[in-house]
Amino acid sequence: MRKNYFGLLLLAAIGAGPRAAQAQADFRPGYLVRPAGDTLRGEIDYRDARTSATQCRFRPSPGAPATVFSPTELRAYGLPAERKHYRALTPAGAPQPAFLEVLVSGVANLYALRDADRADHYYVATETFPLTELVHRKVMQEQASVMHEQNIYRTTLAQALAGCPVAQTQLPALRYTAAELARAVAAYNNCQAPPADVAAIAAAGGTPRGPRPRLGIVLGAERTAMNVDFTDMYNGAHTVRFSPKIAPIGGLFLAVPLGALSRKLSLEVELLYESLRYDQAFGNAYSSASDRYTFDLAYLRLPLLVRYTYPTGRVRPFVEAGPVLAYAMQLDNSLVKTDNQGNASAPTGFYQNNFRSLQEGLAGSLGGQFGYANGRQAALLVRYETDTGWAGGMGLKTWSNHVYALLTLDLFWPAAAK
């Protein structure tokens, strides 16, 4: 039942993410440029690529009423911390302007536009080359019944980026992706602009990128309860419930944005180290005999969690869920039996032939994310996890339940705050 619960939680987070991202305001520091050229600073509602192309929702300060601007009312707007910048331009054949996202800025500019059908379009422009769409089509050749690619964008780029051999040599094999198109346009800018100018453009955020992965540390503590059910040689069923242990836990995490699905979704990958020791005696209700179990366990845990962050306020609540893998670095145990006279046996191994080096589990977390120290992110969370335990087999079942209290801290924020 617990596994089904966390599976449903993960599906709900993925399914609700894009809809919630569209419905919930997410104001972040930004700017807009009015037609006269003056710049206003305040907060921009951070939306998906399709909505960002048609409107800019701006408020001058937190709590102030928001105003929605169309592309006919602004020259540009942007969210520097997210490395998102938009310009109001009119593509050829379009009845009205749209907010085109700036992918590369310089002597040559590369833009992106997501239309109402969620299709991405790319445009190039220079001082001497007008704004032109980079067209890539697949058409059916009826006679051969095969799809034929029309890579018109390569011809367009050859004309727009003329005079730069470095850029031209990339074009014959250039794929129709934002990354490769940007690489070719950036190569042209490097040809045309002195190095100092290129550095100034980059420092001003002129070549914006999407949110980047974040690397950080994890610190915290866990409360773990281990359970063992087994059958002895006489087919007697035994249940052993060890008292919960509290131990420190820590490691590293990598947060990877899942922007293709939703700006509010990310993949949280952690590598944690834990060491647990159990030493507990269990008596017999009908005699003074007892069994003492000792376990020394150490694991590398690898949670792979999908996180949905609710876009509101300075502290952003989130929920996350997903599978957990754990590799046993140490699996030692012993059993000492004491009879009614108090005589203790020599320590023997307890089901050592059934050790499981790879452990599987499911986890779910609730927490809040907030900023600290120059745009870095921190998070406080509580996590519940259940796993398959240290061993398994015929007549043997083990499992553990974990409750974690964790703090995560970014080690750095790669160029996102420029």
Image: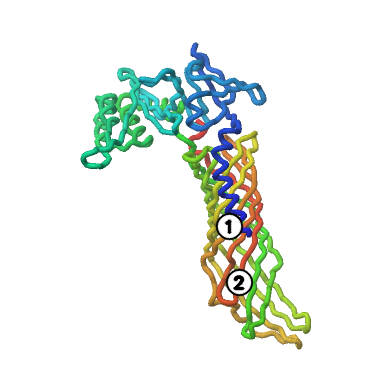
Amino acid type, residue under disc 1 in the picture: Leu
Q: Which residue is mark 2?
A: 397
Q: Position of residue 261 (x, y in %)?
A: 49, 41
- For the residue pair 101 and 407, the one nearer the viewer reads as 101
Query: Quick one: SS at disc 2?
Result: strand
Is residue 341 or residue 14 the one in the foreground? 14
Q: Position of residue 304 (x, y in %)?
A: 53, 52
Image coordinates of residue 69 in percent, x first then y, are: 54, 19
Secondary structure beneath dot 1 equals strand
Say which amino acid is labelled 2: Lys
Horizontal side, residue 347 vs residue 100: left or right: right
Q: Residue at x 29, y 24 (%)?
A: 160
- Quadrant showing the N terminus: bottom right
- Are the residues tagged 1 and 2 within 8 Å (C-beta)? no
Q: Quadrant of residue 242?
A: bottom right
Residue with the most extreme bottom position? 341
Q: In the rendered view, would you say 123 is above or below 397?
A: above
Nearest the eye: 272 or 396 = 396
- Judged from this view, the residue extending furthest toward the left is 143
Image point (62%, 60%), residue name: 386
* Figure check: 224 above or below 208: below
Q: Residue at x 44, y 30 (%)?
A: 114
Q: Number of labelled discs?
A: 2
Quadrant housing residue 190:
top left
> Eyeballing the image, is 147 above or below 336?
above
Percent of width and height locating residue 95:
41, 18
Residue 124, located in which quarter of the rendered image?
top left
Residue at 34 percent across and 26 percent down: it is 133
Q: Along the polypeptide, which appears first: circle 1 or circle 2? A: 1
Question: Residue tagged by mark 1?
Answer: 362
Whole-number angstrom distance, CA of label 1 to CA of label 2 = 17 Å
